[in-house]
Each structure stands twice: as C-alpha cells, then as structure tokens.
Amino acid sequence: MRIRLRLKEERKKRKLTQKELAQKLGISEVWVKKIENGVNDPGRKLMFKFEEFFGVSHRELFPDLSQQNGDTFCIKKTG
C-alpha cells in the first residue's frame, strides 16, 4: 500500500472531505479513499483531473506511478 501524502495534503489544504472532492471530480468517495491510500491507481484521465483540480503536477500527486528514466519521466504501466 502506498499512501499518497501530497494528494491528501492538497485536499486538506482546501478543507475538502473525500466526499466533497469526489463530488467535484465526478467519482465516488470510496474511489477517492482508495486512490489516496494507494489501494487503487487512477486511470490516466483521472490522474490529470486531479492535476488540473489541484494545480499540482501528477508526478507530485502520484510519485509512485512516475519513474524517472534518464532525463524523462514515464508513467509506469499498471495492471
């Protein structure tokens, strides 16, 4: 399990509950919880929704899904 602290910090900084964030992103509260706790990974589209909503790079929000390869970043293939 990978806890995504930056994702949680950004949500809390905006004083949003997981339910409120879920409503704003059009997903379920359970899905937000699982993503924050690293139980599930967001798809590419959802990852960029989080990035746009928070104004923070998806690489910072989901560091466990990005890997540095030389001087470029790649999204790790999951599932």
Image (cartoon, rainbow, N blue to C red):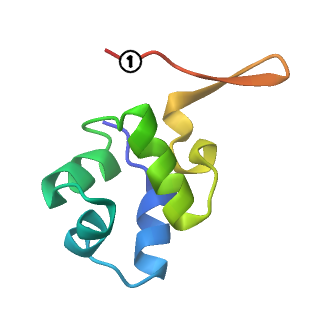
Quarter of the image where the N terminus is located: top left
Q: Residues within 10 Å of mark 1 (few under 14, many from 20)?
A: few
Name the residue that disc number 1 marks.
78
Query: Residue at point 23% right, 68% down?
Result: 23
Task: Give the x, y percent position of residue 29.
Answer: 17, 60
Relative side of 30 to 39, left or right? left
**Number of dots carrying numbers:** 1
Q: Quadrant for residue 47, please give it.
A: top left
Relative side of 22 to 64, left or right? left
Query: Residue at point 31% right, 69% down?
Result: 24
Q: Quadrant for residue 55, please give it.
A: bottom right
Task: Give the x, y percent position of residue 38.
Answer: 32, 41
State the residue lying farthest toward the bottom. Answer: 15
58 over 24 or under it: above or below? above
Q: Secondary structure at mark 1?
A: loop
The kind of residue tagged 1 is: Thr
Task: Give the x, y percent position of residue 9.
Answer: 47, 69
Of 14 and 48, the residue lying toward us:
48
Query: Residue at point 48% right, 80% down?
Result: 13
Q: Quadrant for residue 68, please give it.
A: top right
